[in-house]
Image (cartoon, rainbow, N blue to C red):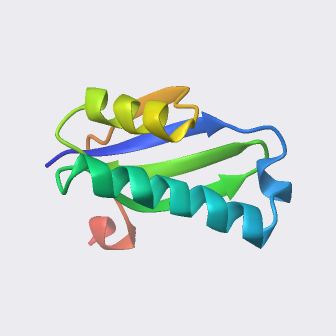
Amino acid sequence: MPKYVIEREVPGASKLTAEQLQEIAQISNGVLLEMGPEIQWLHSYVAGDKIYCVYISPDEEMIREHAKRGGFPADRINKVANIIDPVTAE
């Protein structure tokens, strides 16, 4: 199943407290539970005014539906073409 990177513009994202991040995660998990196992949230990176999320999903539309239901922005959604890491050099 394809992986996607979602860029979410959230002013002050890097200043969110642990409690605020927990609340966001709980909302996301609740929506994912409602949507079923086809869409999965792997992890997110909080940097500056953005949150970058990595998801597994059958398509971009399902990611947009998750964002809509959760009240999250989904400013850019990119399908992952490949993954490289230090082992790629070998």
Going by the image, does 53 lie left or right of 82?
right
**Residue 46: x %, y % from top left:** 67, 56
Q: Quadrant of the C terminus?
A: bottom left
The answer to whether residue 2 is above or below residue 68 is below
**Residue 52: x %, y % from top left:** 56, 48
Q: Nearer the viewer, residue 34 or 41?
A: 34
Q: Nearer the viewer, residue 7 or 83?
A: 7
**Residue 50: x %, y % from top left:** 69, 43
Q: Could you tell me which residue is drawn at 46 percent across and 30 percent down?
A: 68
| Image-quadrant location for residue 19 | bottom right
Can residue 81 be seen in this snapshot? Answer: yes
Q: Nearer the viewer, residue 26 or 45?
A: 26
Q: Could you tell me which residue is drawn at 81 percent across and 38 percent down?
A: 11
The answer to whether residue 43 is above or below residue 3 is below
**Residue 48: x %, y % from top left:** 79, 48
Q: Could you tell me which residue is drawn at 64 percent across and 62 percent down?
A: 23
| Image-quadrant location for residue 10 | top right
Can residue 83 be seen in this snapshot? Answer: no
